[in-house]
Amino acid sequence: MFHRILVANRGEIAVRVIRACREMGVETVAVYSTADKDALHVQLATKAVCIGPPKAADSYLNQTAVLTAAVESGCEAVHPGYGFLSENAEFADLCRRCALKFIGPSGDVIRSMGDKAAAREMMIKAGVPVVPGSDGCVADSGEALKVAEQVGYPVMLKASAGGGGRGMRRVFTPEELPAAFDAARAEAEACFGDGSMYVEKLILNPRHIEFQIMADSQGHVVHLGERDCSIQRRNQKLMEESPSYALSEELRKAMGEAAVAAARACGYEGAGTVEFVLDKENHYYFIEMNTRIQVEHPVTEMVTGIDLVREQIRVAAGLPLSFTQEEVRLQGHAIEVRINAEDPANGFRPCPGKTEFVHFPGGCGVRVDSALYNGFTLSPYYDSMVAKLIVHAPNRLTAIRRLRRCLEELVVEGYPTGADLAYLILYHSEYLRGTYDTSFLEKHLEELLDWQELPSEGADE
């Protein structure tokens, strides 16, 4: 096992990794920007190293600074968390050259799955269903038009190196396509340095279902069930739950096996997520694989009882998985809501500021992952998420009621958050019935924000 690990991240995920390491008896080294000198992860780590000024490009994305901190502090491994350098193949390669274990898949695997067009081809060969679309990348909008005509409108234009909703455009008519193609390509080049584009049939209003997988260096690959991530805004997830109300046991088994096949096809090691869209006829299609721990991983931890970060570290140290596929059992129901410092009533405008007072809920089946504390100032340089509120209960309705209660107890003063919107969603009939899809917020946001009175307490019976 490792003696010391550098945590190449910040915020709640850095705190999450540090806590897991402390329970395992592993020392941690935190890195931080000058804006984060008072951050919780800096205070909790065994040692902390300042690596640059506030801008992420000069600190958390500065590979040389991060690696120098790891080497000079005597670390044996680097945990990248999510975001920042977590899916940077070059960084994974550099870790290896510096004799540091990158806690995640190899640079080659990250590269192959990060190239969405190449990943699509790999999945086709592995027998994993994919959305109909172009065979690889298209050269220009003219070629994209030909593909769109073949698969039928609407289509989705996707950046091969894209992620987080960037480099993507929906197109419903041939007239829209050229401008949308140019805009998506320009966005991809600006965000990822790669303007390669491909075309897929747009599955209208699907469910977004993802499967958590874990793989070790001995060739064992398992899945830990699914998460339904269909409550989204502009392809950004806001709420997640497990198990999905939309999946039968037969469908869960088939999709889980497809997720395992996808991981095997690319020679995966560590924690990863295979993402699918599920249409109204229960046809599922691979869309991408995230080669890192996910924001919503606590949902899976709550229903399986497996510590995914601990398992990541064990696997990276060369140990086999501590469980088999047969030993994975989904028990009860878990829901997570992301609490973001933003104002839903004003276009979800980010609202960084000083945390005047914070109180987190507690009780049976309640978990809060956060780096907030009273007096902490949220920086405008980073993501707006301030906390994740996760509940677990014997069944879905009890989990919904528990999450309502927790949101009633939650207090974050100093800036607006999306907590009230999440609370309203938990009373909406479409959410209660479990019939929602990725269009839920697009259809109901105005209605939710205009609600003056919640349904009666018995409305969800």
Image (cartoon, rainbow, N blue to C red):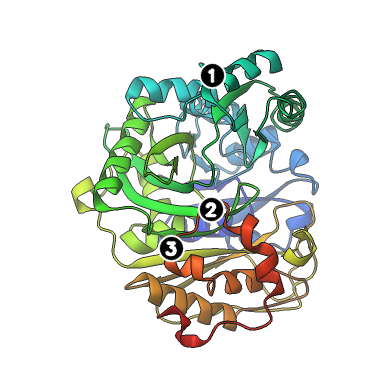
Please give the residue where the numbered disc 2 appears in the rendered image: 295
* Residue at 69% from the left image edge and 38% from the top image edge: 61
Mark 1: secondary structure: helix
Spatial separation of the CA atoms under disc 1 and disc 2: 37 Å
Whether residue 449 is visible here, answered yes or no, is yes
Q: Position of residue 357 (x, y in %)?
A: 71, 80
Mark on residue 434? 3
Identify which amino acid the numbered label 3 is placed on.
Gly
Spatial separation of the CA atoms under disc 3 and disc 1: 34 Å
Mark 2: secondary structure: loop
Assign the C terminus to one quadrant of the image.
bottom left
Assign the N terminus to one quadrant of the image.
top left
Identify which amino acid the numbered label 2 is placed on.
Val
Front residue (pair 108, 400): 400
Q: Residues within 10 Å of mark 3 (few under 14, many from 20)?
A: few
Front residue (pair 395, 272): 395
Please say if 142 is above or below 33: above
Q: Residues within 10 Å of mark 1 (few under 14, many from 20)?
A: few
Q: Position of residue 266 (x, y in %)?
A: 39, 26
N-terminal label among 3 and 1: 1
Please give the residue where the numbered disc 1 appears in the rendered image: 150
Image quarter of residue 412: bottom right
Whether residue 319 is visible here, answered yes or no, is no
For the image shown, how many numbered marks are present on the structure? 3
